[in-house]
Image: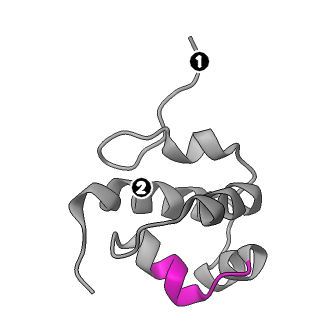
Amino acid sequence: MERIPVLEPFGEHIRELRVRLDLTQEDLGGLCELDRTYISGIETGKRNCSLLNLFKLAEALQVEPKDLLNYDDAGKPKSTEK
């Protein structure tokens, strides 16, 4: 499966959030009821996450769904403070 450049920062963001919680891809997949290979595909920019799965990921990563889409070009979280 080919990497899709626009999805890579999103995948990096998901990976960063997962690592912050000290979760493996398998752990996160179990919490979301998604296969580990699907999580890997998201994190590597090879899979396009559906809206339903975005909500599952947000719950498992203990963030609001909107926070999954709040990242910079490198996949780093943007500050929500104003």
Q: Amino acid at mark 1?
A: Glu
Q: Quadrant of residue 44?
A: bottom left
At label 2, counting other C-alpha atoms closer than 10 Å, the crowd grade (few under 14, some 14-19, many 20 or more) is many
Screen quadrant of the C terminus: top right
Above or below: residue 79 compared with residue 69: above
Q: Going 61% across and 88% down the picture, which residue do you hit?
A: 35
Q: Going 65% across and 82% down the picture, which residue do you hit?
A: 34
Nearer the observer, 15 or 33: 33
Marker disc for residue 81: 1
Tell me, yes or no, whether the highlighted magenta stretch contains residue 34: yes
Q: Going 67% across and 80% down the picture, which residue do you hit?
A: 29
| Local secondary structure at mark 1 | loop
- Front position among marks 1 and 2: 2
Image spot of residue 58 (x, y percent): 68, 55
The tag earlier along the polypeptide, 1 or 2, is: 2
Tell me, yes or no, whether the highlighted magenta stretch contains residue 24: no
Count of numbered circles in the view: 2
| Residue segment shown in magenta | 33-40
Q: Quadrant of residue 48?
A: bottom left
Nearer the observer, 69 or 48: 48
On the picture, is 4 further left or further right than 43?
left
| Local secondary structure at mark 2 | helix
Q: Which residue is mark 2?
A: 10
Q: Residue furthest top?
A: 82
Image spot of residue 25 (x, y percent): 59, 80
